[in-house]
Amino acid sequence: MSEKFEIILNFVKDLSSETPDAEAYIFARDNIKKYNLNIDITSRALKNRLIEVNTKMIFLDKSDSQKKSHFEITYTSIIKIKEKIKDKKEIEKIVLCDVQNIIYSKLENIFLNLLKDSGFPGIKFEKKIDFEKLYNERFN
């Protein structure tokens, strides 16, 4: 728990695994190492110092091939800012870094299970995401 915010709840807002046919599955299985993981974080203010934070993970092949799979999850966290923080940069850091550091291992586990259950076992994301570093790089 943080002294600046509290996570009220987390849930899977959207979950998608798309493989159009067997040929696309075989192509994706053979080329899965070329897939890239992208993360997009958005937020919106709610009432009473609540913020909805949506963390979207997308695992996709960026090539022009029509024979590919697409995997996506949107994981939502509702947070409550405990103190009256007025500095937008501080709230931004909470949303983009602090919340992500707390939820990421669970989100990654859900996403890896989606991949496994979609016929792609054994996938691991070797590089762990350093949200602090990504946050700091935004200002350089």
Image: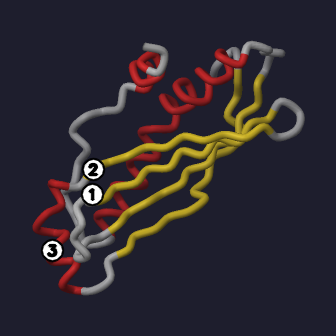
- For the residue marked with disc 3, what is the amino acid? Phe
Report helix, strand or loop for mark 3. helix
Camera-side residue: 66 or 117?
66
From the viewer's perspective, is residue 48 above or below residue 25?
above
At 70% across and 17% down in the image, what residue appears?
4
**Which label sits on residue 62?**
1
In contact (CB < 8 Å): disc 2 and disc 1 = yes
Which numbered disc, 3 or 1, marks the residue closer to the eye? Answer: 1
Which quadrant of the figure has residue 60? bottom left
- For the residue marked with disc 1, what is the amino acid? Lys
Which residue is tagged 2?
Answer: 36
Applied colour scheme: secondary structure
The answer to which of marks 2 and 1 sits earlier in the sequence is: 2
Name the spot of residue 70 as percent of width and height, x first: 35, 66
Q: Horizontally, is 31 left or right of 14 in the view? A: left
Camera-side residue: 105 or 86?
86
The answer to which of marks 2 and 3 sits earlier in the sequence is: 3
At 17% across and 54% down in the image, what residue appears?
34
Which quadrant of the figure has residue 123? bottom left
Report helix, strand or loop for mark 1. loop
At 25% across and 76% down in the image, what residue appears?
66
Which numbered disc, 2 or 1, marks the residue closer to the eye? Answer: 1
Give me the C-alpha separation between circle 2 and circle 3: 15 Å
Q: Horizontally, is 34 left or right of 138 in the view? A: left
Which residue is tagged 3?
Answer: 27
Name the spot of residue 130 as percent of width and height, x first: 37, 25
At 83% across and 30% down in the image, what residue appears?
49
